[in-house]
Amino acid sequence: MKQTLFVHTEGFQASGSGDDQQHNLLFTDEGMLEAALSQIKDASVDEARLAGFIPSDDAQGHVFRVLKPLAKLVVEGIASREAGQDLSTDLQIQGFFNILAAKGDGERFVTCQKPDMELGASAALPVQQRKVWTMSAVDLAEGDLVDEDALLDDGLEFTRGCGPEGESKGEGGKKRACKNCSCGLAEKEAAEAAAAITGGPVEEVLLKSSGCGSCAKGDAFRCASCPFLGKPSFEPGQEKVVLSVGDDF
């Protein structure tokens, strides 16, 4: 004998043959529905029909439990297309498959089935064997080999400066500033040369000429990169400033 479940609001009538044993429930609230469904045995219902309301997630779970494998569920009286789409998503999350949301005779409905498996069932997944790629000496043609040194030679030429890696060296291995020195070695050599010329107790010698024409006027007129910053003003032509330790006493 076919077991059917019909849960409905007022205005919906049960359908089925006289040979069906039917659980006919009038829906009033979710609590009543869940209490009534909890009294039905697991996997004992061949077909379920809900009409006039959207079942909650808990009610969907109870219906899924009482249905037999491959049993059909029909939800009728859905108000809108969006409500049908939302219900379809919820039913899929519950585990139903073959879900169809449609409209017929002016009413919207959703149909689905319970899969042919029991709760907690498991299945082994096929494991694909890994293929090991091998290569022998005969697989390599001579044209496939690449010279490693050729990969490093890209045709670019570099000019070394006078930094730690590429100083120009004079006699005795002493570092010498290159033509376009930018590391400060040229300034250091100029200071050493000035100290050698004065021969006295020189603290600092500046041999740089003005580039902007305002160096002699003082710090207020000097640019940010002026070599005379912090020095007193002087007459043009007197860029050679010698500070002696004896001047402080």
Image: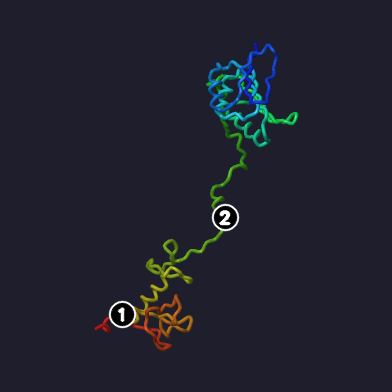
Q: Quadrant of residue 52?
A: top right
Q: Position of residue 155 (x, y in %)?
A: 58, 57
**Badge number at residue 186:** none
- Labels 2 and 1: the sequence-earlier one: 2
- Mark 1 — residue? 202
Q: Quadrant of residue 141?
A: top right
Q: Quadrant of residue 76?
A: top right
Whether residue 131 appears in this view of the structure is no
Whether residue 15 appears in this view of the structure is yes
Q: In the image, is 209 to the left or to the right of 112?
A: left
**Badge number at residue 154:** 2
Tags 2 and 1 in contact by the CB under 8 Å rule?
no
Q: Amino acid at mark 1?
A: Val
Q: In the image, is 57 to the left or to the right of 215?
A: right
Q: Tell me how far mark 2 sits from mark 1, CA to CA.
A: 51 Å
Within 10 Å of disc 1 (Cα), the crowding (few <14, some 14-19, many 20+) is some
Q: Residue furthest front?
A: 10
Point 69% across, 17% down: residue:
16
Tell me which colouring the rendered structure shows.
Answer: rainbow
Q: Amino acid at mark 2?
A: Asp
Q: Position of residue 163 (x, y in %)?
A: 43, 64
